Amino acid sequence: MNTNKSFFSVMKSYNKNFWLASTMELFERWAWYGLFAVLALYLTGSTDDGGLGFTHTEKGQIMGIVTAILYLLPMITGVIADKIGYKISLIIAYVLLISGYYFMGEVSSYTAVFLVFLWVAVGAAMFKPVASAIITKNTDESNSTLGFGIFYMSVNIGGFVGPAFSSTLRTQFGWKIIFLQAAIVIALNLIILLLFYKEKDREKSTDTMSEAIVGAIKNIWEAVRDTRLSVLLVIMIGFWTMFNQLFYTLPTFIEDWVNTNALHNSIAEISPWLASFMSGGGTSVNPEMLINIDAGAIILFQLIVSYFVLKVRHVSAMITGFTVASIGIGITFYTGNGIFTIIGIVIFALGEMMTNPTFSSFIALISPKGKEALYMGTYFLPIFLGNFLTTFISGNLYQAWSDKLSLLQTEMGNRGIEMPEITKEFTKNDYFAMASDKMGMTEIEMTQFIWDTYNPNKIWYVIVGIGVVTILALSIYDRLVIRPKEKRTV
């Protein structure tokens, strides 16, 4: 790899399709994260606030299982894209996404939400390998690391703008507009695709679709038999399981345990505008805006980090990234102090910047010519398993260890205080208000008492433990597999 090129000369090497793919990725992530960053809050929110009132176990199943399926499907959708063409694949993806996002805001039962979200997942799965493959086809070894850094920065610009809009929109207009926003943004992507994207000539196969899919599965099996790839895929399950806590678990942890009113007032003393922005015009910082600090930090620093990572071995960069990310995610769950939540998210973002684009670049470099979409599909295997494991951490484990309502119900039972069941008429908010009154405490005092008594932050042991195991596994893998191979090729 030539690492002597200047930053600006590398930037000039990217063509029109590279920038179009990055732009479409930005808008697709705007729609996705505009919904996903608040989805845990929406699913578990009190019904009198417009939420669905689901349990955390139900939330974990909807978010974890459906998103896991989303990341498994690219093994098939990547083949379909190679067969029918990238432009047609993207048209199909956008139609599915527009309809899915809209109808997701129109349903409220567990089954209906699960099925419509699955519809959205199919559309997203059609999009994902195509966007990555366009980047792969329009970069080479001299600029792929920075190219995927730019691509990942686009992900995070969309990932920042979406939740920022959602925070203000849901505060002022309610939840349904969040789903409408997502549908409109994808419609913009469809317009961009139809007007500006021109697909280059591609190699046409004489295989039928079924033959292509069977061949793809065989090729994937052949690819994962490569130790360099397969072990990395397994190890990356740990990273994605840890990363997912940022969107699955942390928003509800903040909602339950962080006094965001106090955080809002602290920020307002420095910048009233920033406090208003982070609260969506309200009086408390919205959890999604704290989560959004991750994307904001990546927007500011991704290009710089990616440029310096150009000079570092792929595996060394990922080990460092894992370590930094584990420290960051641990801090966010260790305390109920909003300032430490912010610090932890920033630290996590730095680790994420070192890790994820580097891994993308590694797979791109070993992708055989003409099968870029297919091989980039293997990138999604650890994300699939990471999401599946997150189902239990964010769902069952959080419900048992960290859910404020569950712990409060336990405390009221221990005190022998009779409380009504949660219904549409007697909501979670009503339960909290009645419980604090019967305990003779303000709601803030009650929250602190439950925190001190039941230690809901102990979930951080599991989350950080996953990161530590991942770091150790990657270090051993580097020493036993990668470094010996590097010596043999010198």
Image: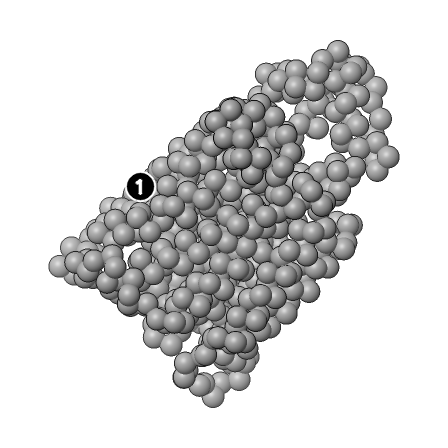
Which is more toward the observer, 449 or 381?
A: 449
- Relative horizontal placement of residue 257, taking residue 488 as reference (left or right): right
Q: Tell me the quarter of the picture where residue 150 sits.
A: bottom left
Give the number of marks.
1
Above or below: residue 293 compared with residue 188: above
| Residue at the outermost bottom position | 206
- Residue shown at the point (48%, 61%) measured from the top left: 25
| Residue at the outermost right position | 425
Above or below: residue 463 compared with residue 377: above
Tell me, yes or no, if residue 64 can be seen here. Answer: no
Label 1's element?
helix
- Residue shown at the point (79%, 37%) measured from the top left: 48
Above or below: residue 427 compared with residue 128: above
Which residue is the site of mark 1? 320
- Relative horizontal placement of residue 201, taking residue 384 as reference (left or right): left
- Residue shown at the point (71%, 23%) measured from the top left: 408
- Relative horizontal placement of residue 404, taking residue 474 as reference (left or right): right
